Image (cartoon, helix red, strand yellow):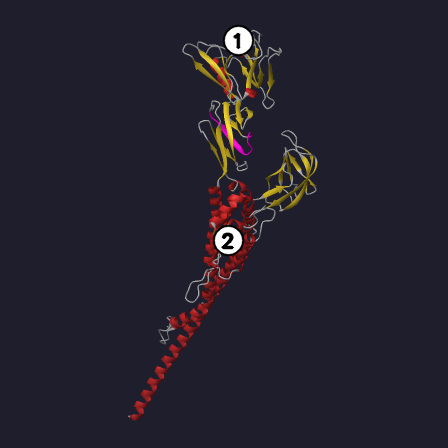
Amino acid sequence: MPITSAGIGSGLDVNSIITGLMNVERQPLTLLATKKSAFQTQVSAYGSLKSALSSFQTSVSALSSPAKFNVQTAISGNADVFTATSNGSAAVANYAVTVNQLAQQQKLGSAGFTNISDPVGTGTLSISFGTFTPEVLIPLTPSTFTPNPNKTNLNITINSSNNSLAGLRDAINAQNASVTASIVNDGSTNRLVITSKDTGEINSLKITTVDNDDNDNTNTAGLSRFAYDPTAAVGSGKNLSSLQDAKNALLNIDGIPVVKSSNTVTDAIEGVTLNLLKSSNSVSVNLGIATNQDKIKESVTAFVDAFNKLDTTMRNLTRFGGEGGSSGPLLGDSTTRAITNQIKGVLSKSIEGAGSLTTLNQLGVTFQRDGKLALDATKLNSAMSTNVKDISALFAPSAKATDPLITFSGSTSKTQSGTYAVTVSQLGTTTTNAEGTINGTTATGSTTNLVGATGTVAEGLSLKINGGSLGARGTVTFSIGYAAQLDAVLTNLLSTDGLLNARTTGIATSIKRVDDQSAKISSRLASVEARYRAQYTRLDTLLSSMSTTSSFLTQQIKTLNANNGS
């Protein structure tokens, strides 16, 4: 019977021999596993880098808006009379504000009804909005009602399905328009109250009816009971009572009378919104507009901190451990070095056309020997005291025009920095678009704005034309601040076809190649081990057979020798 257990017949340790041989054969697998681990470490490191860059972009993106640096405080001397806010473009100054009258909306009330289910008649109610001018006796001038051009009439149909006081109320409110209706019980009867949602004399109410019940649209019966023509006689088309007249807000700013339809005044003082709360009883209240230096310092500090946080991450990823130390997973990596150079390249150049401030150093922001940024508070305070309006241009997109009646409204990521000539061929209004050119190319008009044409270097540059003459209007110099430039660089780096994604995609390809090589080697090793085992099993069998033959021959020799001796 043949020997099947390797090493049993001959004493040869076949399993140990094969294990040793296979360990040698598996060395390429070990090398590939080490290589794959190194690639995976790089992928993880790039993930950390990508996360750090994304966090940095979030910070700089928030700082690429002029509003982060054009910050002001608006302080009312009496917050019970009015409060105020500033968008950052107001002149730093003090104003004397007197609130003589608050704006209010008109309220109309009907005659009393016993029950809210009482019928009101059928037909159509038409509510108009406009300005009522009372009659003047000397010289005799009749009263008038001038429609508000920005509002359309509201038409309410009353039929058998809603022919009640409650039905009329609900029909008006269902329009969800510029009036509301409610029913007030005065203790003995129910009265319909119709209220304009908007304040100001321009939102006075006029109600006309088509009375289907008696075909008389002005009497005090049927649906015409709800007619209200302020120019008509009481009981003949003026059948509701004015519970509260529409009024404008009346105020005085530094001796200048101001009339507004709303208690939220946005266009009396440029850049300032006033929220009127009550009359000041002819007493002026101070309004102070000042630069909010704390907010500006907060934004500059946030920029420095965001960069330093990114710098720390990148240095940890690329550090040299030295003798016995642990080096970073991206030590010597060309991609990381390119990213570092792009970011520092932006911070190292000046921002031309931004005004009197052109470098971060002028704000007190400088690179230190360790590669981080530091902020000199004294230098920043000095810059805020002398050039505060130019600080935002160091971080955000901005434009300066040689014509004081042209102001910067906005830009896009495609707008390139430069100096562009501007011509105006038509001034814009709320209903007519401005016309003209920017950098010699016809611009797109948008009310009072001219916008740079698509496909040009000025694409997306929006300029507000605040009046002035037609023809050549000088030049506009557009610049892109540090935060805005960094935002663009980071967007490119983090994009699907950016440097980081290309590098990680390349590593992923390398990992797959290693896996494929490992699979091929593993597949080959199975056949190699089978071959070794077959070879050494045969050797073991041969050696065992030779050992048996040797023992037989030895025994035969011993027997022959014994016989000869006898």
Q: Residue furthest bottom?
A: 565
Q: Amino acid at mark 2?
A: Thr
Q: Is residue 513 above or below residue 401?
A: below
Q: Position of residue 334 (x, y in %)?
A: 54, 60
Where is mark 2, residue-wise? Answer: 366
Is residue 270 within the magenta segment? yes
Disc 1/disc 2 C-alpha distance (Å) = 81 Å
Label 1 or label 2, whichever lies nearer to me, is 2
Q: Residue at x 52, y 46 (%)?
A: 383
Query: Residue 391 colored magenta?
Result: no
Task: Read off the magenta span.
Answer: 267-277
Residue 165 place in picture, x, y as percent: 48, 13
What residue sits 46% from the left and 52% below the top?
309
Residue 125 visible, this orientation:
no
Q: Is residue 188 visible?
A: yes
* Residue 452 coordinates in the image, percent (x, y): 65, 41
User: Which quarter of the picture shows residue 561?
Assistant: bottom left
Above or below 307: residue 434: above
Q: On the picture, is 147 further left or further right than 291? A: right
169 vs 324: above or below:
above
State the quadrant of the C terminus.
bottom left
The image position of residue 52, as x and y in percent, is 48, 51
- Label 1 sits on residue: 222
- Give the position of the N terminus as an image quadrant: bottom left
**Label 1 is placed on what type of residue?**
Gly
Label 2, secondary structure: give it.
Answer: strand
Residue 182, relative to residue 476: is it above or below?
Answer: above
